[in-house]
Image (cartoon, helix red, strand yellow):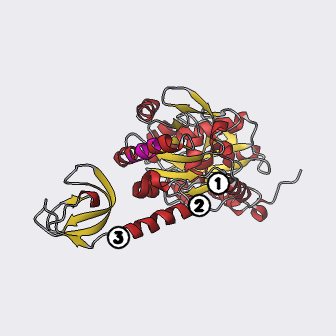
């Protein structure tokens, strides 16, 4: 068989081989320090990736075990994948320590060679994983984010595969099937705080809130209290038409157990990757976050936190029309109230104000929306607690 014209079909691979040749390198090293000739690779069938990393780099130390797991899994599945380590360590001791954790191959340690490769492949940060696909369909961006988002499903790391995965996410997000969002062939249930299992099929036809939160996050703990209040109000007034499922960002199982123990709703199992998938599908960049799914399985809002914070259980079923009805009702209520009053319990004039939440200084109960407030001091009064001076 004639040797393929790599230069014509794949410039990145050609450049990689050319740079190695310019330094007199015609082999790679395995973990046993065996020399693996470059000529032994089937470049037409094998997906080859360059892994730029260093032992001194904390993000590299964090990502490398994930990449090892991915590599071993794909190789076990019979996928044609090879990774080549390009060290950016400062010395050979650092190189040896880092490479000792890897099951793949490496370019021999040579600072000048590594510098040439880094410059050719425009590596500006590490870790960085650069594919050298022969079909010319490599994704343009670095693969780290793609792998962290999709795991082994990202293979073979091509533009076509990336677009396929994006289409799957779009379909999951808009497809109207809560069971596809929350379950998979290996798990058809979510868990309760008492450890019980509830079939995901029981959620079909309900309004479901996907609550992205964590016990270590103070804003999450504050929002959890608001969500518990709304949840319990809906449970008592409307039955089980609304359910919440925790999508945890806790750091370990113990923290997750503490978190769910304070919640009256359900959760995805901590060890399940669906938690990461839902964060990606709904583009969750910060917590707490609440995604509201309608009875038809389609998203109502990705800003459920704002809806609950502003309106609580009153906003159910959380549709745009229900929000508009609440806001219209509030406008009418405000129009019926005086702009300011002089209450016998306070020395200053109190002006009508719209507040997300406050505590009435007279009855000491929490209030929302309309309040009579003092500009001179921190004093708020429920409209129902007003006693105007004659």
Q: Residues within 10 Å of mark 2 (few under 14, many from 20)?
A: some
Q: Which mark is residue 336?
A: 3
Residue 127 percent location from the top left of the image:
51, 50
Please report whichever mark, 3 or 2, sits nearer to the chain's N-terminal start. 2
Residue labelled with disc 2: 121
Q: Which mark is residue 298?
A: 1
Q: Closer to the observer: label 3 or label 2?
A: 3
In the figure, is residue 381 to the left or right of 370? Answer: left
Looking at the image, which residue is at 55% across and 26% down? 196
> Please, is residue 71 above or below residue 195 in the view?
below
Front residue of this view, candidates 368 and 129 = 368
Element type where label 3 sits in the image: loop
Magenta range: 226-232
Marks 1 and 3 in Cβ contact (< 8 Å) = no
Image point 71% across, 63% down: which residue?
A: 11
Mark 1 or mark 2, whichever is nearer to me: 1
Q: Quadrant of residue 187?
A: top right
Across and down, in percent, residue 185 comes to 71, 35
N-terminal of the two: label 1 or label 3? 1
For marks 1 and 2, give the CA distance. Answer: 42 Å
Q: Residues within 10 Å of mark 1 (few under 14, many from 20)?
A: some
For this view, does 111 lie left or right of residue 104?
A: left
Q: Residue furthest top?
A: 195
């Amino acid at each position: 068989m004639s040797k393929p014209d790599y230069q014509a079909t794949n410039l990145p691979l050609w450049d990689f081989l050319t740079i190695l040749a310019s330094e007199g390198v015609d082999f790679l090293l395995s973990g046993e320090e065996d020399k693996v000739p470059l000529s032994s690779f089937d470049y037409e069938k094998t997906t080859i990736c360059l892994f730029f990393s260093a032992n001194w780099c904390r993000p590299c130390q964090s990502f490398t075990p994930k990449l090892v797991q991915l590599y071993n899994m794909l190789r076990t599945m019979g996928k044609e994948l090879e990774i080549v380590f390009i060290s950016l360590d400062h010395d050979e001791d650092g190189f040896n320590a880092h490479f000792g954790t890897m099951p793949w191959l490496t370019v021999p340690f040579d600072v000048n060679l590594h510098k040439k490769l880094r410059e050719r492949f425009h590596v500006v940060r590490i870790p960085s994983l650069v594919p050298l696909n022969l079909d010319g369909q490599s994704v343009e961006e670095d693969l780290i984010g793609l792998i962290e988002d999709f795991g082994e499903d990202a293979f073979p790391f091509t533009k076509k595969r990336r677009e396929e995965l994006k289409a799957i996410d779009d379909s999951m997000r808009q497809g109207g099937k809560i069971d596809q969002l929350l379950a998979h062939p290996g798990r058809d249930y979510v868990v309760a705080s008492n450890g019980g299992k509830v079939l995901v099929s029981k959620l079909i036809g309900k309004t479901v809130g996907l609550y992205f939160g964590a016990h270590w996050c103070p804003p999450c703990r504050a929002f959890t209290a608001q969500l518990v209040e709304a949840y319990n109000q809906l449970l008592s007034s409307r039955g089980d038409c609304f359910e919440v499922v925790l999508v945890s960002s806790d750091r370990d199982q113990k923290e997750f157990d503490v978190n769910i123990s304070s919640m009256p709703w359900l959760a995805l199992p901590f060890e399940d990757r669906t938690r990461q998938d839902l964060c990606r599908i709904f583009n969750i960049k910060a917590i707490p976050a609440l995604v509201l799914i309608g009875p038809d399985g389609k998203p109502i809002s990705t800003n459920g936190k704002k809806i609950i914070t502003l309106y609580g259980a009153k906003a159910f079923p959380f549709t745009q029309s229900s929000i508009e009805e609440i806001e219209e009702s509030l406008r009418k209520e405000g129009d019926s109230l005086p702009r300011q009053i002089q209450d016998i319990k306070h020395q200053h004039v109190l002006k009508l104000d719209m507040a997300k939440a406050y505590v009435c200084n007279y009855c000491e109960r929490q209030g929302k929306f309309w309040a009579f407030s003092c500009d001179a001091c921190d004093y708020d009064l429920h409209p129902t607690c007003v006693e105007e001076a004659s």
